[in-house]
Image (cartoon, helix red, strand yellow):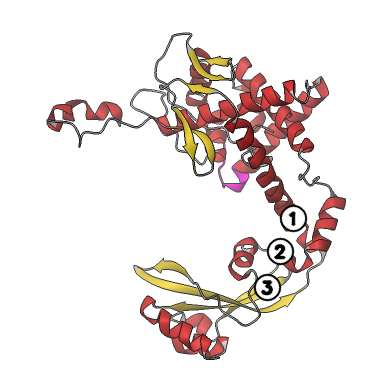
Amino acid sequence: MRRLVALFVLALLGATLYGLSSSSSGIVVNNQALSANTLDSELSAISHNNTLQCFVTALSPTSYAPGAGGYSIKSTGAAAWANLRVEGLAINQYVTKSLKYDPSAHDLALAESSLEGEMTAQASANSITCPGTSAQALAAMPSEMRTAEIVAQADSLYLVQKIKTTIPLTTASAKSYYAQHTSSYDTLCVSVALVLPTSVTAFAQGQASGLSVTALVKQFSQDTVSAAKGGAVGCFSPTSTSYSNVRADVVSLPLNTFATTPNYISNNGQTYALYVAVTKRTPTSFNAAAATVLADLQSVNASSANNIKNTLLGHAAVHVDPAFGRWGLNTTGPSVFATAKPATGDVTGPKKLSTTAATYK
């Protein structure tokens, strides 16, 4: 595993090529340095190889669109890549020094396969068709970069196994988890009401007075198609691609009751309050729910892994070359931030900057 931000999800991100040729330290974590030259080499590989770039795009939630120069990547990508390298170094130091872990050849082979599998899965999940395969993307990395990614994957996989709250991703564990949370995998039949914002108060008052789901839909819903069926839009089993979202909308709701707080959506320029109610729950077998159970286990493990990662980073001494970003604390934990652009609004005579503004865009 490459990182602990999300369990078993590789997050290779792009970074800006600043044209630095010095051998200065790009990042330093607890006295272990990664040179700017090494970072530049990795970024150059991403910029120049379409297959690698495509898989990075599929995996990355951060834009690494071209910067000002040829084969360059924006500063947001630079910070994201530096952040992942910081995480990798921190994890490596912990498993090496504290857990005395040194991946064997077998461990590295498994890690490489895991890495390729994640890259392929994420490309598919994001509906991106890449030229070539994830194995070719990995092969396109410079030798040092490829070795670092595989070792980091092995380190993270090992660390995840050592977290006490981690649930093994086995059939036995999944069945046990399902048995303890059976109601979380019911097939859900739902009704909706699409309400104008001006009618939200009246809708809430109507429900408080005891109006049924059907009556509320008939009186307030602007969706004539579902309104004709009392608001019913169908039933969703754990095999449905929409199941997780539907389940989140009706979690803990009693039957035939709309949530008191709606979601707001826009359609054809009009904003509506969307209310959802579950009208029927039917138990679903483990076999039908297995994929959703697995996703839930991964989410539970990801939360545990993220806590460990933030603890490691919180205790690490980190230095980041300003060319690649700045180290700081955000709402989710320590991270590398993109270096801010110079502002013209607070500069006397901002027109003097207009001729060079394009350089920093």
Q: Position of residue 200 (x, y in %)?
A: 42, 79
Q: Is residue 150 visible?
A: no
* Residue 129 is covered by the magenta coloring: yes
In the picture, measured across the screen, residue 288 lies left or right of residue 208, that is right
* Residue 235 is covered by the magenta coloring: no
As helix, strand or loop, the secondary structure at mark 2 comes to loop
In the picture, measured across the screen, residue 323 lies left or right of residue 4, that is left
Which label number is shown at residue 238? Answer: 2
Q: Which residue is mark 3?
A: 188
Which contiguous range is marked in magenta?
123-130
Residue drawn 15% across and 32% down?
A: 350
Mark 2 or mark 3, which is nearer the start of the sequence?
3
Q: Is residue 273 visible?
A: yes
In the picture, measured across the screen, residue 350 lies left or right of residue 79, that is left
Compared to 206, does 52 lie above or below? above
Q: Position of residue 88 (x, y in %)?
A: 62, 27
Q: Quadrant of the C terminus?
A: top left
In the picture, measured across the screen, residue 199 lies left or right of residue 331, that is left
User: Farthest residue toward the front?
Assistant: 315
Amino acid, disc 3: Leu
Amino acid, disc 2: Pro
Which label number is shown at residue 291? Answer: 1
Residue drawn 72% across and 66% down?
A: 184
- In the picture, residue 5 is in which quadrant? top right
Mark 1 or mark 3, which is nearer the start of the sequence?
3
Residue drawn 69% across and 33% down?
A: 1
Q: Position of residue 299 (x, y in %)?
A: 68, 50
Mark 2 or mark 1, which is nearer the start of the sequence?
2
As helix, strand or loop, the secondary structure at mark 3 comes to strand
Q: CA distance from mark 3 to mark 1?
A: 17 Å
